[in-house]
Amino acid sequence: MSTISSLLSASWLRSGSLLCVGLDPEPAKFPDRFANDPSLTFEFCRDIIDATKDLVCAFKPQIAYFAAFGGEQQLERTIAHIRAVAPDVPVILDAKRGDIGPTAQQYAKEAFDRYGADAVTVNPYLGYDTIEPFVERGSVFVLCRTSNPGSADLQGLHVEGEPLFLRVARDLTTRFGDSGRLGLVVGATYPAELGEVRQVVGELPLLVPGVGAQGGDADGVGPAMTPGGGVVVNSSRAVLYAARDDGFAQASREVALATRNALADVHRRRPRSAS
Amino acid sequence: MSTISSLLSASWLRSGSLLCVGLDPEPAKFPDRFANDPSLTFEFCRDIIDATKDLVCAFKPQIAYFAAFGGEQQLERTIAHIRAVAPDVPVILDAKRGDIGPTAQQYAKEAFDRYGADAVTVNPYLGYDTIEPFVERGSVFVLCRTSNPGSADLQGLHVEGEPLFLRVARDLTTRFGDSGRLGLVVGATYPAELGEVRQVVGELPLLVPGVGAQGGDADGVGPAMTPGGGVVVNSSRAVLYAARDDGFAQASREVALATRNALADVHRRRPRSAS
């Protein structure tokens, strides 16, 4: 299996995009033609994928939105559709898994064998040995600094003179940074911290949620960019639910295009030495 | 929905047991009659449940062992079987979920609406606001101190003079302790720390993994016990895979009985004032 670093390097170059579209299907927000029907989740995701696949560096399905109603087969079909129509676009399964060794192995099977994801999001609280079963089979984005208001409760606590999330970034880079299989999740809602994390992780890919509905903007992501790209900037709700009428797919495409262009503009203006 | 505190108080009293059997079905370890066949996962779990249901205060299915091979329906059938043959035994869904608000709501739907669990295990790294969507719908056991070798990487870091896991225990107790919907996960492999956690969480139920295959023993759990019980001591592999021949269910029962009795003996010998 190719590493997430190599897949993303190729994808950034080919697509010219730092945008990731997050697939968080909520039937209550579906366009009118899907009429709040969970059984049409695949069809909704398919239309979004078709409308945005040339504008993204990755897709990120969020498993909870499928699992809540028993939609595992719809998730399998969604990923199969991405493979069919956009075989070069990496798939990041957002699942925030994490458990001790033998159970982590089962979660790794779920992400990589069952769903065929290129990378899965995982939680570091249980310790770095619990990341290993995932890195042995595929790639990970480990939670570092999340975009929600309460993220400071643990991540912002000071440990030996630095916030916990920086300690986590440093420790993970030391342990797994050379594998090509490690990325970190750092929210767009804290631009200064995106820069601090970039300083300690070298060229590692950063998955950056929080742009769009959560209030982050393209400029704020600048400090995390590298000359080759460096960031996978996720937008879910702002793209998925751009309109409810039959022009919804075109509306999603327009939001994705504007976000991709705003990110590309920030990337173009970054000093080349700033990586 | 009844709170986990009230369900467990009744269950400890009725069963006289502090033992929880963890359902971690691994086809490669199944008894010979199930011949390494994932499609017989429900039948294996059913036989274990039938053999141990009068000896436990709770059952804890681990979702990863089902999800790895697409066994969501087998998990649904397993929980339905527990409800049918042991309606008073609480079901703790071990899923280690955790995400920001809207996604946490989806995971809460998965645990409480789809699977009908009484409680679900969750991860605190994202912050305490991410626990709320779970507590609004049901009960949680939040990871505090886990039983794996690497658990000290984050949980053991010192924050303002105490290890992170104690800070987490204290903060969660302050925020959710009065709801009856909060428990914590504290591994049996650290007996002294079980006592430290008990000191800061009052009467909260503690889910204690690590007895049996992971090396913890009944004596080590003593410091976490309360007069009413206080602990849900999980054993998975030692009970599930006690034998491979056709006497496997009886062998599982014997291991469960011995573990229940050892725990009851430790509980009986605790000084009444030590809670």
Image: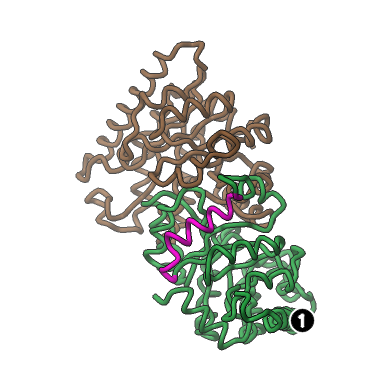
Chain colours: A green, B brown
Q: Identify the residue at image location x=33%, y=23%.
A: B262
Vertical arrangement, residue A273 with respect to residue B4, above or below: below
Could you say which quadrant of the image residue B267 lies in?
top left
Q: Position of residue A15 (x, y in %)?
A: 60, 86
Instruction: Tell me if A112 is positioned left or right of B102 in this view.
Output: left
Vertical arrangement, residue B48 with respect to residue A26, above or below: above
Pick the front one: A86 or B219 = B219
Q: Is residue A166 magenta?
A: yes
Q: Identify the residue at image location x=57%, y=28%.
A: B204
Pick the front one: A99 or B56 = A99
Residue sitting farthest toward the front: A273
Could you say which quadrant of the image residue B190 lies in?
top left
Provide the chain ID for the residue under circle 1.
A
- Label 1 sits on a secondary structure element that is helix
Instruction: Tell me if B261 is positioned left or right of A237 in this view.
Output: left
Could you say which quadrant of the image residue A14 lies in?
bottom right
Q: Position of residue A249 (x, y in %)?
A: 72, 82
Instruction: Tell me if B261 is positioned left or right of A18 in this view.
Output: left
Residue sitting farthest toward the left: B245
Q: Residues within 10 Å of mark 1 (few under 14, many from 20)?
A: many
Per the picture, the main secondary structure of the magenta-coloured stretch is helix
Q: Position of residue A206 (x, y in %)?
A: 58, 68
Q: Is residue A248 magenta?
A: no
Q: Position of residue B11 (x, y in %)?
A: 50, 27
Report the residue marked by disc 1: A251
Q: Identify the residue at image location x=64%, y=36%.
A: B171
The magenta region covers A162-180
Is residue B76 among what the camera can see? Answer: yes
